[in-house]
Image (cartoon, grey):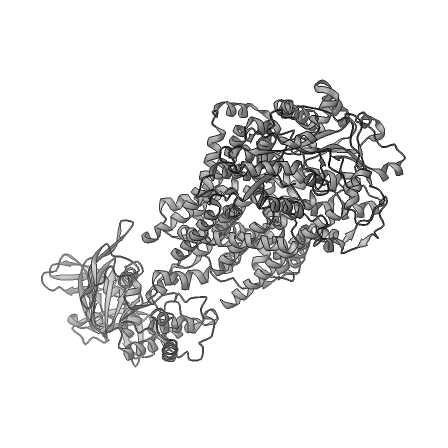
């Protein structure tokens, strides 16, 4: 069980982490999600012991390890650029942690074989790491981090530098391995799809603060702020003002719930709209664009002085571009209102 | 790791220091000298056997550097005996007060002319004459008479034939400058050198360059250079194939050469005074004196010492050398060299 | 990091004991009679002005010339594969370790009054060229000596700069020379500055080359120190000149340190893949340049070697020996006709040289590795930052002055080292240390901090990180550093002649002894021994080159 208490960190007087509290129960995969500069890599470094927090504590199973040097923590870290040792071959890289722990040679060999098997690289023991492809290097880095059986595995943008197809495939494999090993893991990424795919819970960081933490579906269903919504890839976010009991948005006026501040942010969920005028709220617009996405259509609709994005089932029959289209939605399900940022 | 290595180094270093730091056992004699010093193994072995001692030699660079080292070492002498200060550096050693006086009984066998220090702090061991050398074959072939004295070199016939060493950087170079000063006087030597410059003089910095790069005997273009009176017989000794006579000759006319005399002295503060006296006596004795010519190409001051046949047959010893006293050399060295530099090099 | 701060004591103690203490002692002694008067005399002496001016002028010119030749060569070595590449590296590094007397003999064998070149001219009815004792001789000899510094320091650094950055620049529309000026040159700057600085300091303090090849018309500060000390025993003036030389070196190194701190950047630990020369024109130009380079290095060296197996044919020679090929000089090397107490066979001299060089390597690495490690840290203590320029000082110090300092200072037990053979490796280490540090620091800095972190995450203690990551990764650099130390020790003559035990002469000392007496046989022997020294060092360099390749293969 990893516990972070009020972690703060400054670089050159600028706050990078401003009081992070976090708990990761055993066996959980927690994704740290945030844009670059949000402090997620710094947080990882602090957990790893590569950097010291300015204040706050890192606890492992209740023991304060804030000042324990990295090599005594028994954590594994897979670096974004893999940081493979150029002067050691595949075996030498994967065996390194076991050798540092003073494991016997046969045991090390067996564990390295197992780790390489796990990542599907059996037989490449004697290969020069620089001769490997990006995907293979990624697997070596993972095997290296896994081989000493760390108590906590940290992965820093492990798929960041790979192409999309490889990424998707490795993501699945990685998720499988993490589940299979039941490893407590911290997974740093800036890609929400990666986080959705791999994490039990997602912690979203914004400018050194925890913006929201929860299971992927919770976050998706109920983003806590406009930032979270935007970061999760929700596009229909608009500024709105409240006047005379009505919420005035760029796509039209809606009945306003009670006790709203005068200025708010409104999210219209793209998956909460249907074709036709059946819903409680109806919007009429002009069809501006449509992209076929397999199971869905992604549709752009010009409504009043703005444009909204709508996801529709691919079975939907769409009219020609430029023709008017009516859509309807349920206020409670399709609209989130956030305080202005 | 580094701690261990550091420890090992320090131990080694201290052990090394320790070995030299031990008080010298009385059975060791240390002789400091310059890097031209050479001696036969058996000659030293005989001394060691007779006195039940070990002789260690320290070479401290050329004669000037070694003298400097002896002077700077001061009260903590580097050795028991210092051999190799010559008459051009003698004043520096005597002014530095580095020697203890010792009136060796063997001085009786040495002509008084060599005894430049009446207090017997520095005792003469050997001499060598710095003279012009020329390649015989060149003059035979060119049909010119070889030069027979210093004045000859001003003649047009010897235009572009002479190379000398810079007195600022070379010991024979300084000796030759002193020869001209002794011969032409303080008032006349610069005129003479001006004449040499006008007649195509070439100056190089060291003996090696003069002898092996400029001397026509050795692949250069100058058939006359400044070297030692001993060089012609040495050419004979170290020829590739046996020669009937030396290929070069020295100009030994009156006043054309400068005599370098080398001295030995007991260093002030030696704990081995008795052994040091024995060594000085040994250096002045025929056994050592007769070994010198073949080893260092310098000649015995002891009248009882015999010369090897090569030297008896081919060594030309000037009857009268140009004389400048050590005190004058010490007092005027800088002035003379500067004046020479101004008129010859600039 | 803090715990390792004691490491700084190793170099500091070493420098304090064997550099500052002796130097301070000789300065103190020299200025016993006051320094104001000698200083005012020095300041008003026109000939001293000329000496100082000439020293800067020849050093600047020599350095520019060395860079002009070294940079293109470093580029070719770093980026391309071509036949004879290893040979070029080996051959260009031989002069660096040769004593001046040997280099002078080598140039003499080729360009002297009766050298091979002038003999050829005479045979063709042309007038001979004057080379020995000219300004050109000084410049060429300096280039001959120091090009290897540029090749090694800049070339090695260059080969580890990723060519992708240059490729990126050219895809952004930069032409060849703009890529060089805006991308390559700034990236090379730290190595270039370091190499230029070293070359300059060597030229600035040049002694033997100026004395022997330059001749009496030319005087540098270093030769003037020699004159003032040995000929005149004018210690105050000599000390002032030594101090001047020292301050100039210090100023240069401080400027360099400031620059390099700003400019150092991580490079790839692995050599970039080498290409064959692409276009016809580039291949021709390179071939032409490489040929010129080969002539510069190989001609004097092979001229010397040829001279050692040739009996010269001169028309006036009376002796019977047939002119032409001979091995007599080599045969004579083992003879000791005079039964000289100080006679040493070449084998023994090689052995002595090896012992001194081995000790120097050990001492230099022991001092240099912790020093470099400290200097390579991101957060350096103020003391460590001071270390860098301090280490360079011995290079700018007159060997003669320091030698006298040893005699004055190290005279009391347990430090009475004046007559100890330990002084030789100590003196050599002072000279080698800056090279060791210069080759190690960039390599240590170039290790991405990520690798150390990765090792720590896998449970490696700081010590294990050093042993499993830093040491293997800088192995090549350590090898290069050791090589530098070794080479410096083998070829060093000045200090060795002042302090070596006469029964154990090194190769250069033995060569000097042979050159210092007249006689056909002795000169031939000197050439033979010089050739052996050349082959010996060349063989060593070749071995190291092979090791390097094996090493690269392992990466």
Q: Where, by quadrant of the figure, is residue B246 drawn?
A: top right
Q: Residue furthest right?
A: B143
Q: Residue at x 62, y 57 (%)?
A: C90
Residue farthest to the top, as pictured: B187
Q: Is residue B260 left or right of residue C42?
A: right
Q: In the picture, residue A58 is in which quadrant?
A: bottom left
Image-based side of A226 in relation to A50, left or right: left
Where A105 falls versus C491 (above or below)?
A: below
Can you name the residue that lies furthest to the bottom here?
A315
Residue C91, position as x, y percentages in the image: 64, 55
> Looking at the picture, how far across and down is residue C375, in whole percent?
41, 50
Indicate whether C141 appears above or below A86: above
User: In the image, is residue A107 above or below residue C10?
Assistant: below
Image x and y of residue C92, in percent? 62, 53
C474 or B232: nearer the eye? B232
Which residue does the image show at 29% across and 78% down from the upper left? A181
Residue A7: image x %, image y %? Answer: 21, 58
Residue C186 visible in image: no
In this orientation, which residue lies closer to the viewer: B155 or C60?
B155
């Amino acid at each position: 069980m990893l516990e972070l208490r009020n972690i703060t960190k400054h670089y050159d007087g600028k706050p990078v982490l401003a009081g992070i509290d976090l708990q990761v129960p055993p066996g959980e995969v927690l994704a740290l999600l945030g844009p670059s500069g949000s402090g997620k890599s710094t947080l990882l470094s602090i957990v790893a012991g590569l950097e010291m927090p300015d204040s706050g504590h890192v606890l492992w199973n209740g023991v304060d390890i804030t000042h324990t040097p990295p090599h005594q923590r028994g954590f594994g870290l897979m670096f974004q650029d893999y940081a493979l040792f150029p002067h050691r071959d595949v075996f030498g890289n994967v065996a390194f942690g076991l050798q540092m722990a003073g494991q016997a040679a046969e045991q090390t060999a067996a564990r390295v074989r197992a780790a390489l098997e796990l990542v599907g690289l059996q037989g490449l023991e004697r290969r020069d790491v620089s001769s490997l492809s990006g995907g293979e290097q990624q697997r070596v880095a993972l095997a290296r981090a896994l081989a000493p059986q760390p108590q906590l595995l940290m992965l820093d943008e492990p798929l960041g530098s790979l192409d999309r197809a490889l990424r998707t495939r490795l993501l699945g494999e990685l998720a499988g391995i993490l589940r299979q090993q039941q490893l407590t893991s911290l997974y740093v990424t800036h890609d929400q799809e990666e986080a959705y795919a791999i994490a039990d819970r997602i912690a979203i960081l914004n400018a050194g603060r925890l913006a929201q933490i929860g299971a992927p579906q919770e976050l998706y269903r109920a983003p806590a702020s406009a930032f979270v919504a935007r970061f999760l890839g929700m596009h229909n976010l608009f500024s709105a003002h409240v006047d005379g009991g009505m919420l005035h948005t760029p796509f039209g006026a809606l009945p306003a719930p009670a006790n709203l501040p005068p200025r708010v942010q409104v999210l219209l969920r793209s998956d909460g709209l249907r074709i036709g005028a059946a819903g409680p709220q109806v919007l009429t617009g002009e069809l501006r664009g449509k992209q076929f996405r397999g199971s869905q259509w992604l549709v752009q609709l010009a409504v009043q002085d703005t444009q909204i994005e709508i996801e529709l089932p691919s079975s939907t029959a769409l009219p020609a571009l430029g023709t008017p289209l009516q859509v309807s939605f349920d206020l409670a399900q399709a609209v989130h209102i956030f305080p202005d940022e | 790791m580094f701690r261990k290595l550091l420890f090992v180094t320090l131990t080694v270093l201290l052990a090394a220091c320790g070995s030299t730091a031990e008080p010298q056992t009385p059975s060791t004699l240390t002789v400091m000298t310059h890097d031209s010093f050479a001696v036969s193994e058996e000659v030293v072995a005989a001394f060691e056997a007779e006195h039940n001692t070990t002789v260690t030699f320290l070479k401290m660079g050329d004669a000037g550097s070694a003298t400097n080292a002896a002077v700077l070492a001061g009260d903590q002498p580097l050795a028991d005996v210092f051999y190799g200060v010559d008459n051009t550096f003698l004043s520096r050693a005597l002014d530095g007060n580095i020697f203890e006086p010792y009136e060796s009984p063997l001085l009786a066998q040495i002509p008084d002319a060599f005894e430049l220090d009446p207090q017997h702090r520095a005792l003469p061991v050997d001499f060598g004459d710095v003279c012009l050398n020329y390649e015989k074959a060149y003059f035979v072939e060119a049909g010119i008479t070889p030069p027979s004295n210093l004045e000859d070199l001003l003649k047009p016939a010897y235009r572009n034939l002479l190379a000398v060493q810079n007195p600022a950087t070379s010991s024979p170079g300084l000796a030759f400058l002193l020869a001209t000063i002794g011969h032409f006087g303080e008032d006349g030597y610069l005129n003479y050198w001006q004449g040499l410059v006008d007649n195509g003089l070439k100056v190089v910095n060291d003996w090696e360059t003069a002898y092996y790069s400029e001397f026509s005997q050795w692949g250069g273009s100058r058939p006359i250079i400044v070297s030692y009176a001993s060089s012609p017989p040495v050419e004979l000794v170290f020829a590739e194939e046996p020669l009937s006579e030396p290929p070069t000759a020295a100009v030994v006319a009156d006043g054309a050469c400068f005599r370098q005399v080398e001295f030995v002295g007991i260093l002030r503060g030696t704990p081995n005074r008795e052994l040091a006296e024995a060594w000085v006596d040994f250096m002045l004795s025929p056994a050592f004196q007769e070994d010198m010519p073949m080893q260092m190409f310098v000649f015995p001051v002891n009248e009882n010492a015999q010369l090897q046949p090569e030297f008896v047959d081919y060594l030309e010893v000037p009857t009268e050398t140009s004389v400048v006293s050590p005190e004058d050399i010490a007092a005027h060295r800088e002035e003379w060299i500067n004046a020479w530099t101004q008129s010859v090099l600039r | 990091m803090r715990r390792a701060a004691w490491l700084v004591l190793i170099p500091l103690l070493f420098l304090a004991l064997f550099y500052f203490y002796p130097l301070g002692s000789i300065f103190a002694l020299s200025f016993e009679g006051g320094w104001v008067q000698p200083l005012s005399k020095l300041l008003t002496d026109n000939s001293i002005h000329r000496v100082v001016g000439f020293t800067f002028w020849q050093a600047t010119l020599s350095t520019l010339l060395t860079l002009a030749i070294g940079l293109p060569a470093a580029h070719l070595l770093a980026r391309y594969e071509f036949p004879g590449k290893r040979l070029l590296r080996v051959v260009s590094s031989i002069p660096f370790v040769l004593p001046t007397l040997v280099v002078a003999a080598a140039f003499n064998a080729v360009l002297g009054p009766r050298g091979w070149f002038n003999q050829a001219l005479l045979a063709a009815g042309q007038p001979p060229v004057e080379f020995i004792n000219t300004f050109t001789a000084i410049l060429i000899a300096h280039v001959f000596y120091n090009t290897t510094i540029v090749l090694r320091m800049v070339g090695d650094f260059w080969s580890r700069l990723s060519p992708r950055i240059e490729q990126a620049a050219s895809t952004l529309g930069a032409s060849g020379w703009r890529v060089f000026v805006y991308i390559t040159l700034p990236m090379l700057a730290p190595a270039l500055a370091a190499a230029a600085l070293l070359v300059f300091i060597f030229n600035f303090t040049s002694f033997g080359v100026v004395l022997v090849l330059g001749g009496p018309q030319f005087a540098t500060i270093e030769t003037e120190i020699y004159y003032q000390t040995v000929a005149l025993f004018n210690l105050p003036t000599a000390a002032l000149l030594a101090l001047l030389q020292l301050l100039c070196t210090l100023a240069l190194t401080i400027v360099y340190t400031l620059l390099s701190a700003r400019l150092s950047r991580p490079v790839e630990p692995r050599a970039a893949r080498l290409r064959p020369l692409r276009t016809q024109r580039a291949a021709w130009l390179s071939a032409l340049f490489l040929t010129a380079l080969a002539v510069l290095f190989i001609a004097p060296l092979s001229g010397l070697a040829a001279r050692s197996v040739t009996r010269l044919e001169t028309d006036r020679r009376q002796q019977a020996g047939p002119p032409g090929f001979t091995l007599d000089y080599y045969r004579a090397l083992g003879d000791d006709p005079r039964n000289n107490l100080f006679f040493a066979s070449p084998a023994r001299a090689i052995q002595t040289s090896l012992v001194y060089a081995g000790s120097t390597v050990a001492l230099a690495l022991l001092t240099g590795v912790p020093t470099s490690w400290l200097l390579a840290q991101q957060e350096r203590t103020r003391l460590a930052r001071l270390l860098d320029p301090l280490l360079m000082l011995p290079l700018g110090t007159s060997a003669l002055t320091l030698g006298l300092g040893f005699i004055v200072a190290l005279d009391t037990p347990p430090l009475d080292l004046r007559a100890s053979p330990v002084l030789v490796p100590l003196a050599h280490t002072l000279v080698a240390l800056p090279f060791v540090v210069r080759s190690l620091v960039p390599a240590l800095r170039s290790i991405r901090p990520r690798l150390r972190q990765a090792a720590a995450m896998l449970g490696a203690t700081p010590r294990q990180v050093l042993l499993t990551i830093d040491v293997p990764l800088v192995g090549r650099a350590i090898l290069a550093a050791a090589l530098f130390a070794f080479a410096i020790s083998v070829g060093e003559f000045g200090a060795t002649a002042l302090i070596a035990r006469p029964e154990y002469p090194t190769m250069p000392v033995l060569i000097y002894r042979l050159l210092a007496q007249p006689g056909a046989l002795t000169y031939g022997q000197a050439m033979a021994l010089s050739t052996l020294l050349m082959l010996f060092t060349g063989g060593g360099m070749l071995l190291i080159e092979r090791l390097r390749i094996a090493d690269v293969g392992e990466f």
